[in-house]
Image (tube, rainbow, N blue to C red):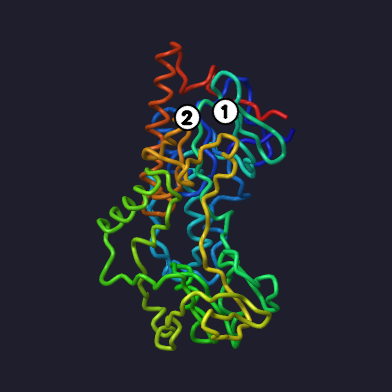
Amino acid sequence: MHPVTPNGPTSSISSTDEPWPTVVVGAGQAGLSTSRHLARRAVRHVVLDAESSPGGAWQHRPRSMRMADVHGVAQLPDLALPALDPATPAREAIPAYFADYEERFALPVLRPVRVSRVEESEGGLLRVVTGDGRALLTRTLVSAAGTWSRPFVPAVPGAGDFLGEQMHSSGYDGPERFAGRRVLVVGGGTSAVQILGEIGTTADTLWVTRRPPLWRAGGFGAADGRAAVALVADRVRAGRPPGSVVSVTGLSLREQEQDAARAGAFERLPLFDRIVPDGVVWADGRRERVDVIVWATGFRPEVGHLAPLRLRGAGGGIAMDGTTVRADPRLQLVGYGPSASTIGANRAGRQAAIAVRRFLAGLDEAHGTDQADGADGTGTTLSA
């Protein structure tokens, strides 16, 4: 095997066969928040991150996204955001903040380690298997894998016949390549608005959404954020697939998007019926030629590694009580549903850490041991 250690990809983490009290999957905002709260409660743990460097999904943001363009970044627990130049690229500033956070609090992050599946093991333990076939055992698990690795593109008739360029918004890296082209942007969320705001004055754009966009009047305060998170939480509590937070917060145009608005970039069309080689066609016969289709159609939660545990219910989602999976209290999901945004991620990290400590305390009582710590407090082995 290739040994690894916290905060470095090449040395050993190990020394005991004791299972981990908990394993955190993912080192984005929700994962780092969880790790910090676990550490504050003296719960020994390890964070497995598939990325090669700190920053989570932020390191993949478009080069054109500056801090002035970011709707909001909630600071991580116990460390204020530094003063940032609004012109700094977000893909540089936020990963640097995350890296400083990991180092300052000596968080036990291992990377790059991709988790391929989590399955049952003996004695009520969970077996976490990595992409290269190594494994470790744990008593509990916090999944903070986010959504970035699962971009969603709907199945539309004729998509395979299109002769132009198709891309998901996750691959968007600035407006330069679209100048002078006819670009169709599909999707009613923040990403669609931001892309149209950037390309709407240099490209010939069309905007298509499944439903009329929900525009927000006035400001958006902390109370509005909490209300939005609560509405999404209601969905996952009932076992339905989580909706996006923006579906309840609504959309707004920033100052830098006003020129595109005046150019007509935000004049919305309903969803087309099919795609043809040179464009799209609506059911009423309307036809538009386009060079590029940008699918700003969001992401799905990355929970495929949990599939062996069969957590989905009849409603199609994973029923939750807070961050705890109702069908299996060994599992916490953060960065899922209401915490899949900066609004809820930090709060979810604290909630998950409390739930993990409470579950381990129940094991302590049942077995007369301290399940939050290991035999020697040093770690375990990723075994072949």
> How many numbered discs sit on the rendered protein?
2
Q: Residue furthest front?
A: 284
Label ID, residue 330? 2
Q: What residue did someone put label 1 on?
A: 126
Instruction: Tell me the quarter of the picture where residue 383 sits.
Output: top right
N-term-proximal mark, 1 vs 2: 1
Relative to residue 107, is residue 200 depicted above or below? Answer: below
| Residue shown at the point (50%, 41%) measured from the top left | 312
Q: Judge left or right: residue 150 versus residue 349.
A: right
Q: Residue furthest top?
A: 368
Relative to residue 91, is residue 18 depicted above or below? Answer: above
Query: Label 1 is placed on what type of residue?
Result: Leu
Find out whether the residues at labels 1 and 2 contact each other: C-beta distance under 8 Å.
yes
Q: CA distance from mark 1 to mark 2?
A: 9 Å
| Residue shown at the point (69%, 39%) measured from the top left | 10
Coordinates of residue 337 in the picture (x, y in percent): 42, 49
| Residue shown at the point (41%, 25%) measured from the top left | 359
Relative to residue 362, is residue 69 depicted above or below? Answer: below
| Residue shown at the point (42%, 13%) measured from the top left | 366
SS assignment at label 1: strand
Query: Label 2 is placed on what type of residue?
Result: Arg
